[in-house]
Image (cartoon, rainbow, N blue to C red):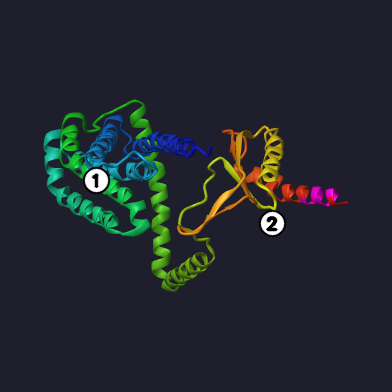
Amino acid sequence: MNDTNRFLYASIREVIWSLAIAVILVVLVVYLFLQDIRATLIPTLAIFVSVIGTFGFMAIAGFSINLLTLFALVLAIGTVVDNAIIVVEAVQARFESGYKSSYMATNDAMGGITSAIVVSTIIFMAVFIPTSMIGGTSGTFYTQFGITMAVAVGLSAVNALTLSPALCAIMMRPYDDETGFGARFRKAYSIAFNAILERYKNGVLFFIRRRWACVGLVVLCLAALFVLMQNTKTGFVPDEDTGTVLVSMNTPAGISLEKTNKIIRDKQARFQSLPEIEYSGGVGGMVVGTLVLLFLVPGLWMIFQSLQEKIRPASDIAEKTDWAIEAEKEYVAEQKKQKE
């Protein structure tokens, strides 16, 4: 009656869309800062290499494609391009310093950044790998998430030390006497970036000359952080709309199971008239107690309402109609009328 697979599949579809949107946004941002199609293609390929390699590791490790692993990949997309961008920027810096050969520029650039890529990747992986050692429910939640993130970043480092330098040597060229849209875009970007950089320098100089303002700002931020941490809601997992509403009520002691089932049928008929309801079902008695003593309580009943997709959130339906309270009031009024 309550099919949780529908919610899970819908959630996975949303995460996959987020994955695709993240790739597009990352590529656009990389192009904005690198200002070259060929240079942008190298970090873009790094995304696909790392993601495909991570899926291969998940298959070997026995991980499933679930919300946590997909969420890890969404976060990793913004991270796996970093190492490739470092390589591209280092090669471009060699071109600006006078190198004409792509091979020589790449070879010299890798000699200066290889250790930095390795160290930064190890530090990043060291943050997420310990999550696999957490026990209990939290460990179950975050083991696959942390390992997936660490593997994706590790593969990006391998890509930055192998494929990215090879692509730089093959594809990248100096910008000497270049004309066209790319040259105009780089010129406009450089003007805008230099203007922002100048404002940033002025801001830094302002705080250097007025240290009391810097200290006061830090104290103010710490105070705001403390206040927000004290007032922000906490919870183990966030509330999610699963598309179902559960109605539960205790009927008076001594009522028969037949009477309870009649109430359920009446309420189901009325609930089914609402356009948001796709299907419903009820149970006219629940088994409660321990493993030793079990009792059938006919006064407990429930109705699952599966809400159709893209109509209204389940919370809105439940709050607006207030089915459980209304049903109880109707039943009490009916009992009083029969006694009279």
Residue 101 in view here: no
Label 1 element class = helix
What x and y, as percent, mark residue 251?
69, 53
Residue at (34, 38) in percent of width and height: 65
Q: Which residues are magenta?
A: 332-338
Residue 65 inside the magenta-drawn segment: no
Give the CA distance from mark 1 to mark 2.
59 Å
Most prominent secondary structure in the magenta stretch?
helix
Which one is in front, 46 or 114? 46
Residue at (70, 32) in percent of width and height: 273
Mark 2 and mark 1 in contact (Cβ < 8 Å)? no
| 162 over 234 or under it: above or below | above
Mark 1 lies on residue? 151
Upstream in sequence: badge 1 or badge 2 = 1
Label 2 element class = loop
**Three-letter code, disc 2:** Ala
What x and y, as percent, mark residue 101?
13, 33
Give the numbered dot on residue 138: none
Report the number of discs. Answer: 2
Which one is in front, 228 or 89? 228
Residue 334 inside the magenta-drawn segment: yes
What x and y, as percent, mark residue 279?
60, 33
In the picture provided, is 228 more to the left or to the right than 264? left
**Three-letter code, disc 1:** Val
Residue 217 in view here: yes
In the picture provided, is 334 more to the left or to the right than 143? right
| 58 over 230 or under it: above or below | above
Residue at (20, 49) in percent of width and height: 117
Which one is in front, 255 or 77? 255
Mark 2 lies on residue? 253
